[in-house]
Amino acid sequence: MNTIYVDNNATTRVAPEVLEAMLPYFSDLYGNPSSMHTFGGKVGYKIKEARAKIAELIGAMPEEIVFTSCGTESDSTAIWATLESYPDKRHVVTTRVEHPAIKNLGEHLSKNGYRVTFVPVDRQGSLDLDYLYNSLSDDTAIVSIMWANNESGVIYPVEEISQEIKQRGIVFHTDAVQAVGKIPVDVKSTGIDFLSISGHKFHGPKGVGVLYVRKGTKFSSFMIGGHQEHGRRGGTENVASIIGLGKAAELAAQRLSVYGAKVRSLRDKLEEEILARIPNAMINGNRDNRLPNTTSISFEYVEGESILLMLDEFGICASSGSACTSGSLEPSHVLRAMGVPFTAAHGSIRFSLSSYNTEEEIDFIIAKLPPIIERLREMSPFWHEAAVAK
Ligand code: PLP
């Protein structure tokens, strides 16, 4: 059975070119980039190249790039570094739809002496900007708003918001983990002070990320140790992964427009056919303002996990809009924040495509999904109750 992988917001395959670029650093080129000898220096030079490629992808300067271990570390570093730099400020602003890397950190801070505002979104997943701006005060240390949502794909206007926040003298961070490599991201003419990236979301390896730190932004190191990353993140570099990430950035820059057009047309076909063939199905999130590769679809009166298991029998890998909380399945905080009705949120599936997907794969999903939903609804008391009520 072939694997049809449509779960690319969870992780992506490492591009063959990326793997090829990484391999020598596991064998022949094992020097420490900090060493004084030429053998280590060659590796140091390659890291410099990778830094330049990442910088180019997001319109930054190489010295503004700090390599980390993942998107989560980048997010945490931005928030903690700012709170440490502004010890008198005790207020943090974020949204109700962030990834747990920010959401759970926000909840942790609110239990530990900070005031945290979680800005709501509407049914389309769009942010309440008045709520955001009205929440700001002299006590606000940092505003953290994701560039694009990992579940709905909704894109947030972080370029405009960051300008407004900057004018008020507040630090602005964006979690761009789902945006980089999928849509154009350019920090140059924005007010963004910190931006998080994760390698494994755009065909780089797992275990490597980036924190962009705008020149002049106050920073205090989260990982104190050696002089690596100009003292901003101690620890011997994850050399092979950093070089892989650099290659992934180079490929993303070359392929961005082709990627967008291709995955959008596959995603749109998938959505249109599903909506045409399956009753009581709905798309979650603003359809005009989403990542080109993502769709979150709710099928009323069925459970997302059952759909996933049945798709899995055909080798189709997607993910659901639920999270296992204390042994029971709860609709995700993102869908709840968007006010998706309970009967629909429970039956939500996220398909997230990559440029490796083909039209044949999309046709296969379109052929397999309708009978799965029909079979599950036949077994669902809620579906029958709803039919009687009509
Ligand atoms: N932020 C967003 C929006 C994500 O989607 C993810 C991963 O799914 C992360 C942060 C965490 O990234 P990592 O897995 O590299 O820690």
Image (tube, rainbow, N blue to C red):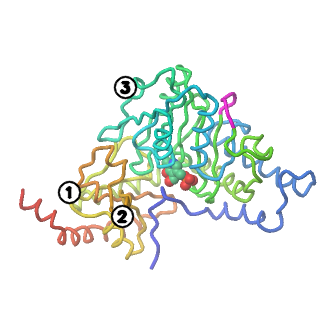
**Viewer can see residue 259:** no
x and y percentages locating residue 367 in the rendered image: 31, 70
- The magenta-colored residue range is 214-220
Give the residue type at disc 3. Answer: Asp
Left or right of 282? Residue 267 is right
Q: Which mark is in front, 1 or 2?
A: 2
Left or right of 199? Residue 61 is right
Is residue 216 rendered magenta in the image?
yes
Left or right of 60? Residue 361 is left
Q: CA distance from mark 1 to mark 2?
A: 28 Å
Q: Which mark is in front, 3 or 2?
A: 2
Residue at image position (57%, 29%) is 171
Give the secondary structure at mark 1. loop
Q: Say the numbered circle drawn on residue 327.
A: 2
Q: CA distance from mark 3 to mark 2?
A: 37 Å
Left or right of 193? Residue 346 is left
Q: Quadrant of the C terminus?
A: bottom left
Q: Which mark is in front, 3 or 1?
A: 3
Give the secondary structure at mark 2. loop
Is residue 44 rendered magenta in the image?
no
Residue at image position (37%, 28%) is 131
Task: Say whether marks 3 and 1 touch (CB < 8 Å).
Answer: no
As drawn, 74 above or below 1: above
Task: Identify the residue under disc 1.
Answer: 280
x and y percentages locating residue 45 in the rendered image: 82, 50
Task: In this rendered view, identify the residue nearer to me: 328 or 201.
Answer: 328
Residue at image position (64%, 39%) is 212
- The outermost residue toward the bottom is 1
Task: Identify the residue under disc 3.
Answer: 130
Give the secondary structure at mark 3. helix
